Amino acid sequence: MPKFWVITCLINFLIATMLGLVLRYAFIGEIDFNFRFLTHAHSHVAMLGWLYLMLYSFIVYRFLPNIRKIYHYLFFITQFAVIGMLFSFPFQGYAAFSIIFSSLHIFASYFFIKLILKDLKPFTTIDKQFIRAALWFMVISTIGIWCLPISIVVFGKNSDAYNIAIQTFLHFQFNGWFIFGMIGLFIKYLTSHPTEKNTQLKKALGWLILSVVFTLALPISWFVKLPTLNIINSLGVIFQLIGFYHLIVALKKPLNTFLSSATLYIKSLVYFILISMVIKVLFQSFSVFPEVNEASIQIRNLVIGFIHLLMLGVISGALLLFLSLEGIFNHNKLFARIGLGLFILGFVLSEIYLFLQGGMYYLNLGELPLYHKSLLVFSSFIGGGVFLFLLSVLLMNKNQNL
């Protein structure tokens, strides 16, 4: 994998964590930026600069025997769009320049999908089929983005239609594009031979696709009060449980074989991802209860906690695992080990505080002592971990290849 790609993605990750620290500090002292505008910059750099570009890099590197120059050019264009969003969102929010760069990123992603779907053919193996589903979910997610200007003109900004459009984008990005891409890559790393006839994995793919479609009803139900939506979401939750059951059955044996010879560092990452995924599935399962659904709307801490669980625990954890399996952190193991320790510690403590405080708000029990200051410290652990990951790659000798 090109060293420049890895460094760029990790720099984006570090910038996103630094912006997150500024947002945490905003609850303690004053900042000179509009909080909401800065939140847009933080989320876009994290999603499109770190998660998207890192997945892009792994799919191209792992599934294509030869990387054509067009993929290098497209990486530069996509990163240019990320830089544009980084320097436009904090100053103007959603306005002319930020919309231009966001649109550039979307069109670059469309071109990437067209290229990679052609180069991945034939889709005979299940890992490729998961990647194909992930890419199509990415396309579907952008429908929400294109509906934003229509919803603003017809219904007004911050209307229910506007919020549903945003939630549609986020739902298919996180639960579709990112999760399916992660699973496809995980299967690729875990199985040494193409998996053409694994019926359990094919069943998992089918049920999980259905679950993503049906659980869209949950974020819609936050703005449209229809009992039918809760029934649809409940079916989606059941489909998700069935899908992950088949996935576990199919991957249990190769995973045990893989872990039997893995280092403690790799094992820690794998268990970290699996625990995060289990918690994610459990939280989504609890959403069938109206009380939990209502709390998830009203209490911001719970929403942020769940988003970070997905972004940092499940997806970022998986990307760090893939980087480790490629041997990228092997040249500076001390930095990588300390970095992983700080990253996991900061993540776990932040999640505990976010969900604990969310529960206390729900029960009207007030606020934890030094809540915002503690979150700032815990978030700095995450930032420190990411910095050490980046440093371990930057300190590689020039003649060392990734």
Image (cartoon, rainbow, N blue to C red):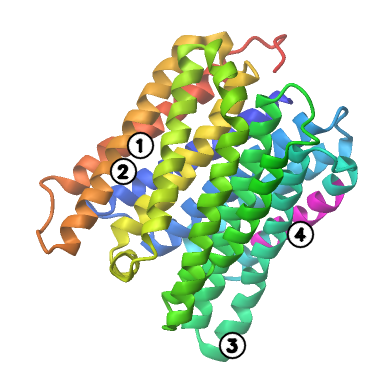
Residue beneath the point at 70% across and 56% down:
105
Residue 361 falls left or right of residue 113: left
Residue beneath the point at 50% across and 86% down:
156
Q: CA distance from mark 3 to mark 2?
A: 38 Å
What is the three-letter code of the residue carrying label 4?
A: Phe
Q: Which mark, by number, is residue 351?
A: 2
Residue beneath the point at 56% across and 54% down:
175
Query: Which secondary structure lies at badge 4?
Result: helix
The front one of 127 and 328 is 127
The front one of 170 and 46 is 170
Q: CA distance from mark 3 to mark 4?
A: 23 Å
Residue receiving disc 4? 107
Residue extent of the magenta highlight = 102-115
Residue receiving disc 1? 347
Counting residues from the start of the chain, the first of labels 4 and 1 encountered is: 4
Counting residues from the start of the chain, the first of labels 2 and 4 encountered is: 4
Counting residues from the start of the chain, the first of labels 3 and 4 encountered is: 4
Q: Is residue 332 magenta?
A: no
Q: Quadrant of residue 341?
A: top left
Which part of the image, by quadrant, shows the N terminus?
A: top right
